[in-house]
Structures are given as C-alpha cells and as structure tokens.
Image (cartoon, coloured by chain):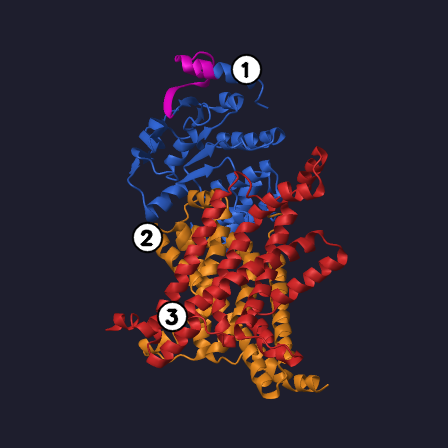
Chain colours: A red, B blue, C orange
C-alpha cells in the first residue's frame, strides 16, 4: 500500500515538476557562480589595489552572511528599492552570488599557487602575456581549483533546497506540500533525500572522473 | 660467559608480503649481556626481524622464547606485558611529538606500568640523567637535535626496565657529527650489561662492541660469527663481498 | 530615519536571538565533535565493515540537504517514533549529525597525517591500541584539526539560520518576524547578517587563540 503511494500520477508529476525546478535552479546558478568566481578570483589576484579591495569586500560579505539571509534580502528586501524579483529569479541571483564568492576563494588560491617561476620561464621563452595565461597559468590553476570549485557545485545542489524558504517551489517544496497533505512525512522526505543523494553522488562521481582525467603526477602539492 | 638459558631465542621467523618473502626462516639466540649486531644490505630484512621480535610486525611463522618462556600468539594484556620487557629504539626516534622529553620518558611508566606520578617523574629524571640530557627535560622533540632525540628515546626505553633492547639502525637518521653521542650511549649500555640486538651500518662500531655479527641478505641469515671472523675472514663469498666493500668505506668509523 | 529607530528598538530582541543561535551552534558542534572523533578513529583503525558503515554514514549526511533532513527528522521521524522533541532539539541533533560527518573527515585527515612511527613507538612501550590512540594520536591530531574545525564552525553557524524553517526563534527568524511587521526588511536582514559575521569573527578569533595556546614548541607536522 505504502509503495504505491509514490507511483500515483499526481504525486509523481508533482515531484518531477519539483525536480525540474531544482535542476533549473542548479544549472544556471553553478554556471554564474563559476563565472563570478573566476572573475572575482582573478581580480583579487591580478587587479590593482582598489579592485582587489572591492573583490575582498564582496567575498567577505557574501561568505559572511548566511545564504538564507542573502535570499531574504533579494526577495523581501529588494522590493523596498523598487526591484521585484520572482522567487525563482531571487533564488538564482542569491545562489550565484553566494556560490561565486566561495568559488573565488578557490580560484584565488589556485592562481596564487602557480609558482612565479613558471611565468618567468614562459616570458623568457618569448610567450606574450596572454599566451602565458592561456598556456601556462590557466592549465595549472584550473587543476588546482577543480576539487574546491567542484565541491562548491555539489554544495549548491544541496543548498538549492533553500529556495523553498523564499517560496520557490522546487523539489523540497513539492515534498513539503505532498507530505503536509498526506501526512506521510517520513516516506516523502526519505524519497526526496534519496533523490538529492543520487544527484550529489553523480556529481561527485563526475568530479572524481574529471580530476582523474586531468591528473598529473606530483602536481597536487601546493607550493 | 654463557648463561644456561638464553634471554631471547627465536626460531624459523618468516614474514611474507604478497609473494615476496622479506624474512626467511630466521633463527637466533642471545644470552644475557651479549650484544649481537645485524649487518647487511638495505632491504635485507634486518628491520623486519627486529620488529617481528616485539610483534610490531606479525610474523607468518616462527617461535619466540623470552627467558625460557615461549611467547605464544601473544595478544592483548600478554602482548603488552611482553613488549614492556623488550625495549625498542627506532631509526626515526619516534619520540611523542606532543610531549616534553621528560613526559616522553614518563608516559610509559605512568600509563603502562601504572606508576604514581611522583615516582615516575623521579625515575624519568634519573634515566634522562644517565643519557646526559637532564638539562633538556622540559624541551619538546622539535627543539632537540637528532642525537638528543635518540638519547631521549633510549632513556624512554630503559625506564621500562627491559630485559633486552632492540636497536633498529639507531644512527642512520643522524648527521655525522651527532652519531658519536649516540654510540657513546650505546657503549655505556653495553658496559652496564644490557642485552642488545642492533642493526646498523656502522660497521666499525659493530666490530668494536659486538659479541657476534649476523649477516642478513634478502631475508635470510647468511652467516654468523665473531666480528673478526665475519669482517675479515668470512666463510661465505657473499659475506666476504659485502664486508670488504663496507670495511673499505667505514674503515675508521668508530670514534 | 525611521528605519534606524525600528532597528534600534528591535536590537535587544535580535541579540537575544543570537543567544539561541549560539546555543544551537554550540550544541551541534559538540555533538559533531564527540561523534566525529569516534567516527574518525573507527575509520582509520577499524575493520573493513566498520569502515564501510562509517563511509555510508558520512556519504548520507553529506549528500542530503540540511532542510530535507530537518523536515525528515522533525515531521517524519518524530511522529513515526512517537517522540516529542522541540524544534530546537531537532535542529541541534540534525546539525550535529551532519557536522559529525564533516568533522570526522577533518579528524581523519589529521590522524592520517601523523607519522606512523608515533603509533609504533607507543606499541613498543607496551601500550594497548586504545591507550595509544587516546594518549598519543588524538592529542596531536586534534591540535592539527583546529583550522579545519574553525572552518566547520563558520559553516554550522550560517547553517543554523535554516532552523528558522522549523520555527526556531534564532536570529534570522527574529529578523524576519520584525521585518514582516514593520516592513523594514533590508535594515533587519542586514543587521542579522552583520550579527552573523560578528559571531563568525569572534568564534574564529577565539579558535586561533586556542590554537596558539595549545601549540607545541617547534611542532610543524
């Protein structure tokens, strides 16, 4: 009797709908998060004093405020200055900026870890600035940043559930509705937990494969 | 002067890792007050043999007798009591990094032998004094030189009143100028009558203090005998080969 | 500046909420610490099945979102097992279990970074494995873990805001409570956010002082 509950069409479609919303939250947020992270990270390493300070301030605030608070600011706070965002838009905005701040830490660390000797050797060989970045700095920095940034994306998969708190109904939200209606809290949330578990596990597996593909012996040690 | 029952006797000690036999059928016995030295190329099984004696490495085969009593499949309390009687000195000192020299020597007394703090402290200071490190007792391992660390580890082992001491290449990790202080400490132990089995590359020293040299290669005991014989007039060709190379290199190593 | 007046008036209320936040975080971190150490020791020194079981536990609590676990425990398991726990208690338990999974990996890394010789020397003296772990391994591993633990603290602190979803009146909940009645959303949320930042700063600063106090002279593993 219990098992058939989840195979009922309306329950299944509600969960699928929720899952789809979650995916729609996660993918853009990850993308923007990485872009923001790389940009801010690079600015914090290679920018001038002002730019660096701005970047550091950005990271300080967006890593210092809890994600929940940030989401509430975008959704409930912005209307006070005339900007009205949908729950979905506010969620993506919040996730992107917050994730971006954390990503920039890893990116910054990665850039800093590339030994200056590498760049000097490239220049000595006649590489232009751009070529040095493209062919020497980036390949190394990317490998160093991958584990941290990859883990941030996995965190994003989990934190996407917080969109529920600003009324964006994704997987967790649908689950709460279903469970409240049917009083089947344990089963519902176990299923939902399992779905997230699958998502994070697959993402972690992909990350490991990627790290394995890009592996260079002896490269893991930070300078 | 040979005593009736050897302090330590081992027979047919064997250890295999995968399909590689790192120790093959090693047997030896040692009487009270003797010093026997294991020599041979690196990887020959010297360290494995020593660590099998106090079961840090579990041998696949072999029997051990301490003072006439056989140590049978030692586990738990019996094993811990056995280990108290067998002192070990490591190549890498292995002092407890989070404890001062004094506490390093004290901890075995308090936590293993159950001594009271005050008595343990007095005994620990005594042992540190014996190795000449009383003034360093409140220093941490990171603040001590290699030679000092090794001497503390000797004090730590001696505080347990062992019947026999195993020394696993005690000077191999030391800078040359620090080796002599440790060799002096070992000489002092010898004079006080401690039974010891030591593995070392310090051939000159071995020749000077050992009652017997044991040549180990590829896990097997090739030859044993008094230093004069092994070093200069060995029976087996492989022994002669090894010793001739080594005595050339270390001709004047004993200080 | 009406907003500032509202803010000023609401401050005591918010600050009392910080006590709730601190209580939640302290409870969760302690639970995570005690469990985490046991899990780490089990994972490093345990047999095959123990290690697998712990691996499963860690995988589960690191893979399922906090919010889902809160709902699962509070609405689901509590009624299933007929236990009546407050939202506060459930929050501490769930945050603690999740943190224990992360903390266990911090401690595990620290334990594994110690040279093998430390354990060998302890054994050579005749110590049982249990004594060796408690007297020799853990004192060093825990010192090494302080930076990682500090990081975990800042994460748990921010995660504690999610307890709002269960109705725990911590800082975030109170900020929203005032905001929804006075429509001063931005000032209240910023105030809450800054309070979180201050708590983060105080905590990590305190841990850094602790790290200095227990530092062993010359030690750098």
Magenta run includes residue A110 = no
Q: CA distance from mark 3 to mark 2?
A: 35 Å
The reply to whether discs 3 and 2 touch (Cβ–Cβ < 8 Å) is: no
Is residue B59 toward the left or the right of residue A154 in the image?
Answer: left
Single out the mark in the foreground, 1 or 3.
3
Q: For residue A15, which numbered disc appears in the image?
A: 3
The reply to whether discs 1 and 2 touch (Cβ–Cβ < 8 Å) is: no
Q: For residue B248, which numbered disc appears in the image?
A: 1
Decide: few, some or many residues near mark 3? Use Cα within 10 Å; few <14, some 14-19, many ≥20.
many
For the magenta stretch, what is the residue range?
A: B219-242
Instruction: Look at 34% across and 50% down and name the residue there.
Output: C47
Instruction: Look at 44% across and 76% down and name the residue there.
Output: C89
Specify the quadrant of the image occupied by residue B34: top left
Image quarter where the C terminus of chain B lies is top right
At mark 1, the secondary structure is helix
Q: CA distance from mark 1 to mark 2?
A: 54 Å
Decide: few, some or many residues near mark 1? Use Cα within 10 Å; few <14, some 14-19, many ≥20.
few
Q: From the viewer's perspective, is residue C162 above or below residue A41?
A: below
Residue B135: x %, y % from top left = 63, 44
Q: CA distance from mark 1 to mark 3?
A: 81 Å
Specify the quadrant of the image occupied by residue B211: top left
Q: From the viewer's perspective, is residue C209 above or below residue B2?
A: below
Single out the mark in the foreground, 1 or 2.
2
**Along the viewing direction, whichever of B57 and C59 lies nearer the viewer:** C59
Residue C137 visible in rendering: no
Image quarter where the N terminus of chain B lies is top left
Q: Which residue matches tag 2?
A: C49
Instruction: Look at 43% across and 61% down and name the residue there.
Output: C63
Residue B205: x %, y % from top left = 53, 23
Q: Chain of mark 1?
A: B
**Along the viewing direction, whichever of A180 and C193 lies nearer the viewer:** A180
């Amino acid at each position: 009797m219990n098992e058939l509950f989840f195979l009922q069409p309306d329950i299944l479609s509600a969960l699928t709908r929720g899952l789809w919303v979650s995916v729609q939250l996660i993918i853009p947020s990850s993308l923007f998060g990485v872009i923001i992270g790389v940009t801010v990270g690079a600015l914090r390493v290679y920018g001038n004093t002002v730019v660096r300070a701005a970047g550091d301030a950005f990271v300080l605030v967006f890593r210092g405020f809890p994600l929940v608070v940030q989401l509430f600011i975008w959704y409930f706070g912005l209307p006070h200055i005339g900007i009205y965002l949908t729950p979905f838009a506010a969620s993506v905005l919040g996730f992107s900026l917050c994730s971006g701040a954390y990503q920039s830490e890893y990116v910054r660390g990665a850039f800093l870890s590339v030994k200056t000797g590498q760049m000097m050797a490239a220049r000595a060989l006649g590489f232009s600035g751009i070529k040095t970045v493209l062919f020497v700095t980036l390949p190394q920095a990317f490998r160093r940043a991958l584990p941290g940034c990859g883990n941030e994306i996995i965190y994003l998969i989990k934190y996407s559930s917080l969109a529920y708190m600003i009324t964006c109904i994704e997987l967790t939200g649908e689950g709460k509705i279903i469970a409240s209606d049917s009083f089947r809290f344990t089963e519902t949330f176990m299923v939902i937990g399992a779905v997230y578990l699958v998502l994070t596990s697959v993402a972690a597996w992909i990350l490991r494969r990627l790290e394995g593909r890009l592996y260079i012996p002896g490269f893991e040690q930070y300078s | 002067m040979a005593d009736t029952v050897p302090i330590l006797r081992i027979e047919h000690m064997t250890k295999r890792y995968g399909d590689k036999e790192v120790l093959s059928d090693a047997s030896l016995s040692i009487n009270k007050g003797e010093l026997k030295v294991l020599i041979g190329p690196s990887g020959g099984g010297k360290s494995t043999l020593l660590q099998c004696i106090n079961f840090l490495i579990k041998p696949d085969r072999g029997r051990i007798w301490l003072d006439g009593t056989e140590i049978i499949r030692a586990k738990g309390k019996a094993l811990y009591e056995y280990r108290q009687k067998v002192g070990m000195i490591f190549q890498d000192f292995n002092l407890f990094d989070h404890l001062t020299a004094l506490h390093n020597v004290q901890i075995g007394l308090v936590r293993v032998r159950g001594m009271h703090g005050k008595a343990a402290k007095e005994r620990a200071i005594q042992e540190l004094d014996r190795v000449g490190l009383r003034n360093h007792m409140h220093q941490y391992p990171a603040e001590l030189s290699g030679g000092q660390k090794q001497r503390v580890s000797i004090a730590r082992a001696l505080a347990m009143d062992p019947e026999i001491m195993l020394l696993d290449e005690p000077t191999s990790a030391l800078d040359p100028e620090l080796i002599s202080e440790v060799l002096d400490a070992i000489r002092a132990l010898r004079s006080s009558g401690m039974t010891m089995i030591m593995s070392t590359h310090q051939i000159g020293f071995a020749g000077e203090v050992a009652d017997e040299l044991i040549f180990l290669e590829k896990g097997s005991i090739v030859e044993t005998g008094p230093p004069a014989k092994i070093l200069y007039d060995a029976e087996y060709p492989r022994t002669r080969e090894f010793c001739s190379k080594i005595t050339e290199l270390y001709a004047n190593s004993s200080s | 500046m009406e907003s500032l007046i509202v803010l000023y008036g609401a401050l005591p209320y918010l600050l009392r909420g910080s006590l709730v936040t601190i209580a939640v975080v302290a409870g969760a971190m302690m639970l995570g610490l005690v469990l985490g150490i046991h899990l780490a020791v089990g994972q490093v020194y345990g047999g095959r099945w123990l290690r697998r079981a712990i691996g499963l536990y860690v995988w589960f609590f690191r893979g399922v979102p906090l919010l889902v676990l809160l709902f699962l425990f509070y609405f689901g398991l509590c009624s299933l097992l007929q236990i009546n726990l407050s939202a506060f208690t459930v929050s501490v338990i769930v945050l603690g279990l999740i943190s224990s999974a992360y903390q266990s990996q911090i401690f595990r890394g620290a334990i594994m970074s110690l040279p093998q010789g430390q354990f060998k020397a302890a054994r050579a003296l005749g110590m049982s494995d249990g004594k060796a772990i408690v007297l020799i391994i853990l004192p060093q591993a825990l010192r090494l873990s302080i930076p990682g633990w500090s990081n975990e603290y800042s994460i748990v602190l921010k995660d504690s805001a999610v307890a709002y979803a269960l109705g725990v009146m911590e800082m975030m909940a109170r900020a929203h409570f005032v905001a929804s009645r006075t429509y001063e959303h931005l000032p209240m949320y910023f105030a809450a956010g800054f309070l979180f930042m201050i708590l983060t700063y105080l905590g990590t600063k305190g841990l850094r002082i602790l790290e200095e106090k227990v530092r062993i002279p010359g030690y750098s593993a």
